[in-house]
Amino acid sequence: MRNVARQVRHLLIVLFIVTVGTFLLLDFLPGDPAAALLGETAQPEQIEAVRDELGLDEPILTRYAKWIGGVVQGDFGRSFRTNQPVLDNLANRVPVSLELMFLAQVFALALAIPLGIYTAYRPGRPFDQITMTLGFGLIAVAPFILALLLILLFAGWLDLLPATGFVRWSDGPLGNLRSLILPTLTLGLSQVAIIYHQLLRSDTIATLQADHVLMAKSKGLPTWHILVRHALRPSSFSLVTLTGVNVGRLIGGSVIVEVIFGIPGIGQMLVQSIYNRDFIVLQGALLFTASAYVIVNMLVDLMYAFLDPRVQHG
Amino acid sequence: MKSPSSATPREGPLLEVEDFYVRFDTDRGRVHAVNGVSLSLDQGETLGIVGESGSGKTVLSRAVMGLVGDGGRNHVTGTVRFDGREISSLSPRDLRKYWGTEMAMVFQDPMTSLNPVKRVGAQFTEALRYHLDLSRREATERAVDLLRSVGIPEPQRAVGRYPHEFSGGMRQRVTIGIALACNPRLLFGDEPTTALDVTVQAQILDLLKVQQVERDMALILVTHDLAVVRGRSDRIAVMYAGKVVETAPTATLFAHTRMPYTEALINALPRLTGPTHVRLRAIPGRPPDMMNPPDGCPFSPRCPYAQERCLVEVPPLMPSEDPEHQFACWYPVGTPEWTEARDRNTHRGETAAGTQIVKEMV
């Protein structure tokens, strides 16, 4: 329990630093939210009126105190532009990013785990070399290029899937999944599957050298049993760590993929609010992504104890 | 799954190894780990394989069992017959049916040979369930019985524990229990006590003995320590540079040592009787580089009796007047040739290989 309290304290410190940091950073950014809101034809007195209305002329400490005071009471403020509550906006977008994150992770792990174990079992064979070459190729290709290639292939030539756009689950599960196939492939292949595969492969190769694997072999157990039941768990520390990092990151949305495929998630929200100088929205989105990141990594720490009973917390 | 060989006992040795070679290709060259070893072992018999680190004894035991297989960068040749059936030519899939049920192995370091993230019970039951087709409950009951028989206190609770919750000696008891789980007829003990405290060593060796007698199981005890096998083996094979250099019934080996290397090993044992604070008689030099084995007798560079012939001609493993006692030496200890060789080397102050003769050596 003391450990949980420490983790929470850690979370609060991180969030304080993140919120103060972004507040300061946004204050230094060139560009006036009021001017951005009113457009190029706005008169100086109109801008002044809006600045006054939004409270932008108050000292930064006052603005921060007001904002954080609201956050603590569950009020993230309203968008400068649409006047929509930031919390409503988040509530709309979080499930979208979550779904994409989940699908991408499942796809990546489903691909990486069997590949990683098999290539670790037979390293240096042609199959291993082919997957490794393909993998490094995919890492080298920037995600947005991969996205465009996939769009070209599946939406252009094959005409199987929509190029962009997002269908909500409530508007039809099938359409929803169809609209997420290409974003999932892009995220899963470019950022996740290959690195997961390489990581698991090298850790599994190390585990397979261990005495306990030889002992398991000497019991006459079938190879798949040794690989899956003996070697996988001790080899998955790095994989779990990296998966945690990626989950934490992707809960906060994937900017490039969401923008390219027109998916209304957190990543898109971040980009739009920066373009619009809609800082109150940006603050809310960043607060959410930072919290998600820290919390997921706390959970990963707890996972270690499950992976290895020798890990004692405290 | 049924065990592959029938339960009815047959005549002849349980294990026969003939002309066995193991070589590894490494980036620096080819390592000649085992160079033409032949062995045989009867049901219920104990064979001690003794040698320094790097003598090939561990590789030999793993390769005989098939854990180190031919293929890739490993080259394993020679025949291994188990219970009359040639197993060295079996596919890995068929060979696996012998592991656990017919042949099993206890490894050197119980700190690393148990899977750290699996409960002890699961490490018993997986083999039981796979080989004997037991249900989960039957297998667990069997695991509890086995843990009790190898001397683990509170076996019902032990099955739910992880390896790190046991001491080294207890862990080695656990690995022995696991090795015995499917009633093998041949157990390899690969330095089973080397990693343990001296006080625990004897307990583990006694446990192996008890289990062996109870099950009429053959035992191959691989060790670098002659003292370990002295009172616990029927026969001993001394290995040097991947070869058996002397083999004899245990009592004969100690009473009529012929090979100078065996003599040096016996002399290196600390004595309980006699004066205290005497320097241990260590063997000078190091075992040969197995990537470039020397011409002639591999022990000649370290042997105090080495003559010119030893440097150029490899002595074969020959039987003496006692067919059970074989050794590979041109000047066997205790023979007139040996006396002559010793006197010549003492006289010239060095061996034919150029090794200085120090008083304690001869």
Image (cartoon, rainbow, N blue to C red):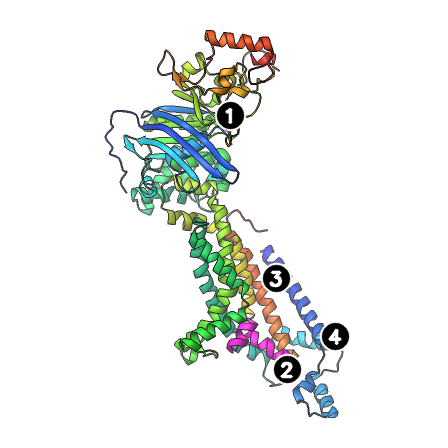
On the question of residue B249 being in view, the answer is: no
Whether residues under marks 4 and 3 lie with C-beta atoms below 8 angstroms apart, the answer is no
Q: Which amino acid does label 1 sit on?
A: Pro
Disc 2 and disc 4: Cα gap in Å?
Answer: 23 Å
Q: Mark 3 lies on which chain?
A: A
**Residue B274 point in image, percent of width and height:** 56, 11
Mark 4 burial class by Cα count in 10 Å: few <14, some 14-19, many 20+: few
**Image marks 4 and 1: residues in contact by CB distance under 8 Å:** no
Q: How crowded is mark 3: few (under 14 residues within 10 Å), some or many (20 or more)?
A: some
How far apart, in angstroms, are the residues tagged by discs 4 and 3? 25 Å
- Between the residue at mark 2 and the residue at mark 1, the CA separation in whole angstroms equals 81 Å
> What is the span of residues highlighted in magenta in the rendered image?
A254-275
Tell me the amino acid under the disc marked 2. Answer: Asn
Say what amino acid the circle numbered 3 marks: Val
- State whether discs 4 and 1 lie on one chain: no
**Residue at mark 3:** A8
